[in-house]
Amino acid sequence: MRPSWRHRGEYLAFRLAVCLIECLPVRISVRWADTLAWLIHDVLPRKWSRYAVSSENVRRALGPDATESEVEAVVRRMWVHLFRTVVELVQSPRKLHLHSYRTACRLTGIAPTVESLLSGRRVLLLAGHFGNWEVALAVFGIWGFPLGVVAREMDNPLLDAWFRRFRENVGHRLLPKKGGYEDMLEILRRGGNVALLCDQDAGSRGVFVDFFGVPASTFKSIALLALEYDALLVVGTSVRLPDDFTVARWARFEICGEDVIDPRTLTTNDPVREITQRYTAALERAIRRAPEQYFWVHRRWKSEPRKRVRPAAAAQRLAG
C-alpha cells in the first residue's frame, strides 16, 4: 500500500518521538511515561481511555473482595506500564544486545524452554499481552533461536515497516496475522518454531476455558497446530522488575518459562480444550504476580458461551 500524506505525517511524528526518547536519560524517560499515564488516566475523559472496560476486567480478575481503590490503582499502573513498554521498545536496539542482556534480564525456570528449543521438535512459543513480550523475543533472537512471529500489521505502512525491521534485526521473521497463515505452516513443515499471542477473544466459535474463573473464548488453532505438527507448547513471560538504577542503567526484566505442554502426554478425550485451558492457566498465574502489567483494555471476555437449553425445557417452550 502506498503511504498517504497522513501516513507520512504520523511517521514523521513517530520518528521525532523516537529521537527524543533515545536522547533522554533513562530516569527521565520513566518520568515521561508516568506523566503520560497521569494524563490518560486522570485528566482526559475516561471514555477515551476505555476505563469502563479496563476497570471491569480488573474487577473480575481481582475478585469480589477487591476495593475500588485497588482496581483504580491497577488500571493507573497499567497505563504507566504501557507507556514504559513503548519507551523500552524504542530503546531496546541500543540497550539490549549480546553483551548487555545478562544485566537487563533475570532468567527464571527457563531451562525447560531452552531444552524444548534444542529438542529437534517444533515449538509454539506462547505469550500474552503481558509484561514486555518484545524483550523476551529479542533475547531468544540473541540466543540464536529464530522464530516466525505472528503479529497484526499496522494500518500505517511506514510504521509497519519500522516495527518489522525492529523484530527482524534479531533474526526473527514477521508473519502478518492476516494473510500469513500459509507462511506459518511452511515454517512448521520445515521444522521451525513460531511465536504467537494466546489471549485474544475468539468469538462464538472459540473454545471456552476458565480465565480468572470466568469462561473466555480462546482460539482453537494453537492447540490444533500443536496436535497436527507434534509441537511442544512453551508459555513464556517477560515481566518488568522494580527499578534499581544503581545496579542497571536500563529497565530490568524477569524472563520466565511458565509451562511446557507436550501433546504426547495428554490422556483426555478433549485434547484441544485441555491444551487451551493449561496454557491459559499458566498465563493467569503469571498475571496474578503483576496484574498491572496486563493489557486490561482488551475485551478478553467479550464473547459469552451459548446457554444450553435442556430438552425438556425446549419441548415445553415449543408446546407453549
Image (cartoon, rainbow, N blue to C red):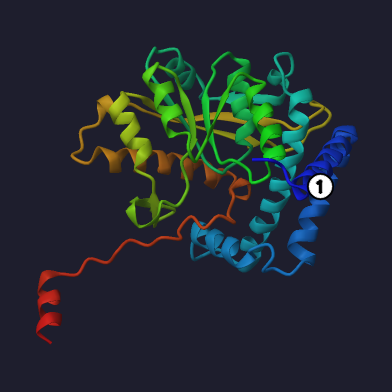
91 left or right of 148? right
Residue 161 x %, y %: 68, 33
64 left or right of 213? right
* Residue drawn at (25%, 37%) of the image: 271
Residue 143 x %, y %: 59, 14
**Closest to the observer, 245 or 208:** 208
* Residue drawn at (59%, 29%) of the image: 255
Please give the residue where the numbered disc 1 appears in the rendered image.
Answer: 9
Residue 113 x %, y %: 47, 22
- 102 lies above or below 276: above
Please tell me in which quadrant of the rendered image residue 74 appears. bottom right
Please tell me in which quadrant of the rendered image residue 120 appears. top left
- 252 lies above or below 208: above
Question: What is the quadrant of the C terminus in the image?
Answer: bottom left
Question: What is the quadrant of the N terminus in the image?
Answer: top right
* Residue drawn at (48%, 34%) of the image: 180
> In the image as oriented, which residue stretches furthest toward the front?
2
> In the image as oriented, which residue stretches furthest toward the bottom?
320
Residue 189 x %, y %: 37, 20
Amino acid of disc 1: Gly
Within 10 Å of the Cα at label 1, are there few (<14), some (14-19), or many (20+) other Cα atoms?
Answer: few
